[in-house]
């Protein structure tokens, strides 16, 4: 339950200094390339040849590898095994296990799907490791994203750890009173109400106070607001974004042209 | 934009009419403040359920809550941001599923608009409708992004159906129809229990308090009996859908 709530790791690398929007564009370009490129080996090549070197450039190689090992590898390994065993079709049988067959076709389909998922999730991880959520939100607000969106995202990121701590406290308190959270199924279902009730009603009561507090600070004012952080957007950022956009267009064009 | 969506004859005297006006009315300060709390409820309850090792997710109770109290648009936005934040903060694997979360919030809002969140058995029907929508929307994502077999435990069922010679989409749809109703009916009922526990004075500050206005009610035991009956009927309907899907 005590998970770190933001993946962000403060460094002063080239990647960290890029404008957040440039990094968003980079992430989506990588994902679109992985899923829509007509070439079979694109996704594994992106993962090894682009995302890995970029994480080294961003000085987050070690956290990147540990996050990928924790979040992606187990899921991807499970999906790979399941799909190569269970996807139907294919003639060339490689291995026969009881009723199940591993064919060349199912193996190659499983490899394609899992490398794509790996590329997608690791692109997101790289983005999250090098971008602070509030920098991203300040930059997007400056680009005319309604400030209320930024409020929801940033304040959720602050509320979740408080809520997790509260949930832990409630769970400990109810266990101390003898609540059974570990035995049979019925008991565990019964345990849900005394755990969830206090947590939910407690946090909903705060909503009203919070609304009054932010209203008093000009939340629904429509005048332009000043920002504490200035996030630089250099010509280099703009150039990178145009190149990435061109890449996306090229990917879709080649996909359409070849199919 | 003269009077495109003004079918529901607005009684309020805000001066705005049409779709834009009705959407804007749904997003007052209380809505914006409820959304982060609702998302945090999604995450916290989702994790408690994981800790209790129950066979459901229950990770969209907050989304349904916003859908009922603030309308379908606010519900959809809450679902979308909920998955976005789940992806940012805990696990990027949640990100591709954001259309499902958005659809859950929107469906809850629409059901509430038609009075389907006013007592226990109506709420069970809402939960079933939400489950159907979630099942339909998540299937293409499961197939196109994950090739049909995802990392969740219910993929074992999909794999089994594939082995019996079913098509990919049929297997994924059947699995979803099998798994989703249990989860979404419990989600809707828990959201209703929360709404029932809140005071009318508190609910009145949200944009759509009329969705939760509980009228004169039969006594609790009859109501719960009806709800149980409805849930059994819904599961029979669900079983009928699955059997039809598989025998096609």
Image (cartoon, coloured by chain):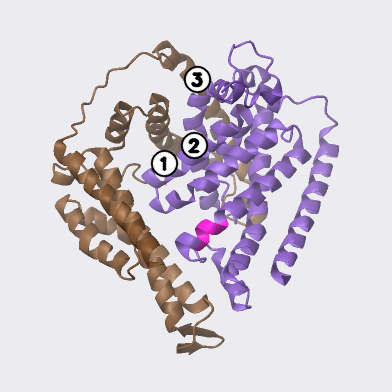
Chain colours: A brown, B purple
Circles 2 and 1, Cβ within 8 Å, touching? The answer is yes
How far across and how far down the image is residue A177, in percent?
A: 57, 40
Q: Quadrant of the C terminus of chain A?
A: bottom left
Q: How many residues crowd mark 3 within 10 Å: few (<14), some (14–19), many (20+)?
A: many
Q: Do marks 2 and 3 share a chain?
A: yes
* Residue visible at 86% across and 38% down in the picture: B222
Residue named by callout 1:
B85
Circle 1 chain:
B
Asked whether the viewer can see residue B173, the reply is yes
Residue A214 left/right relative to B115: left
Tell me where the magenta segment starts and ends, as one range: B139-143
What subunit carries mark 3? B
Mark number displayed over residue A87 = none
Q: Secondary structure at mark 1?
A: helix
Residue to which mark 3 is pinned = B29
Q: Nearer the viewer, residue B177 or B190?
A: B177
| Corner quadrant of residue B157 | bottom right
The circle on residue B39 is: 2
Q: Mark 1 vs mark 3: same chain?
A: yes
């Amino acid at each position: 339950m005590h998970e770190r709530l933001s993946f962000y790791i403060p460094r002063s690398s080239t990647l960290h200094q890029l404008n957040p929007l440039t990094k968003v564009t980079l992430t989506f370009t990588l994902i679109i390339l992985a899923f829509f490129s007509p070439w079979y080996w694109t996704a594994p090549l992106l993962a090894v040849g682009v995302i890995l070197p970029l994480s080294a450039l961003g000085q987050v190689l070690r956290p990147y590898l540990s996050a990928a090992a924790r979040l992606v590898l187990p899921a991807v390994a499970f999906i790979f095994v399941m799909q190569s065993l269970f996807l139907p079709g294919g003639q060339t049988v490689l291995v026969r296990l009881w009723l199940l067959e591993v064919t060349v076709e199912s193996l190659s389909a499983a490899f394609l799907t899992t490398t794509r998922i790996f590329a997608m999730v690791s692109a997101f991880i790289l983005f999250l490791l090098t971008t602070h959520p509030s920098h991203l939100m300040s930059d997007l607000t400056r680009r005319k994203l309604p400030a209320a969106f930024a409020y929801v995202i940033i304040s959720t990121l602050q509320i979740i750890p408080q809520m997790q701590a509260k949930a832990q406290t409630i769970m400990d308190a109810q266990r101390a009173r003898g609540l059974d959270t570990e035995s049979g199924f019925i008991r565990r279902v019964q345990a849900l109400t005394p755990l969830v009730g206090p947590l939910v009603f407690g946090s909903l009561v705060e909503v009203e106070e919070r609304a009054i507090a932010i209203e008093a600070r000009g939340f629904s004012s429509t005048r332009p607001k000043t920002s504490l952080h200035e996030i630089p957007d250099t010509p280099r950022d703009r150039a990178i974004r145009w190149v990435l956009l061109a890449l996306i267009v090229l990917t879709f064009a080649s996909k359409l042209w070849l199919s | 934009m003269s009077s495109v969506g003004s079918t529901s004859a607005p009684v309020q005297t805000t001066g705005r009419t049409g779709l834009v006006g009705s959407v804007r009315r749904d997003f007052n300060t209380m809505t914006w403040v409820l959304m982060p709390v609702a998302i945090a409820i999604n995450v916290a309850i989702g994790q408690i359920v994981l800790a209790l090792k129950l066979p459901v997710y229950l990770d969209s109770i907050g989304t349904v809550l916003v859908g009922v109290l603030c309308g379908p648009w606010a519900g959809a936005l809450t679902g979308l941001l909920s998955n976005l934040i789940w992806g940012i903060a805990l696990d990027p694997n949640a990100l591709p599923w954001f259309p499902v979360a958005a659809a859950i919030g929107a469906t809850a809002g629409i059901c509430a608009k038609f009075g389907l969140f006013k007592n226990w058995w109506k709420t069970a029907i809402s939960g079933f409708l939400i489950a159907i929508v979630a099942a339909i929307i998540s299937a293409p994502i499961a197939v196109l992004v994950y090739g049909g077999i995802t990392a969740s435990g219910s993929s074992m069922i999909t794999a089994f159906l594939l082995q019996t010679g079913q098509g990919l989409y049929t297997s994924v749809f059947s699995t979803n129809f099998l798994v989703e109703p249990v989860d979404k009916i419990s989600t809707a009922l828990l959201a209703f229990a929360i709404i029932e526990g809140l005071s009318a004075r508190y609910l009145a500050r949200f944009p759509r308090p009329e969705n939760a206005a509980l009228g004169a009610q039969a006594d609790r035991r009859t109501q719960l009996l009806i709800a149980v009956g409805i849930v059994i009927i819904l599961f029979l309907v669900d079983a009928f859908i699955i059997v039809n899907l598989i025998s096609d």
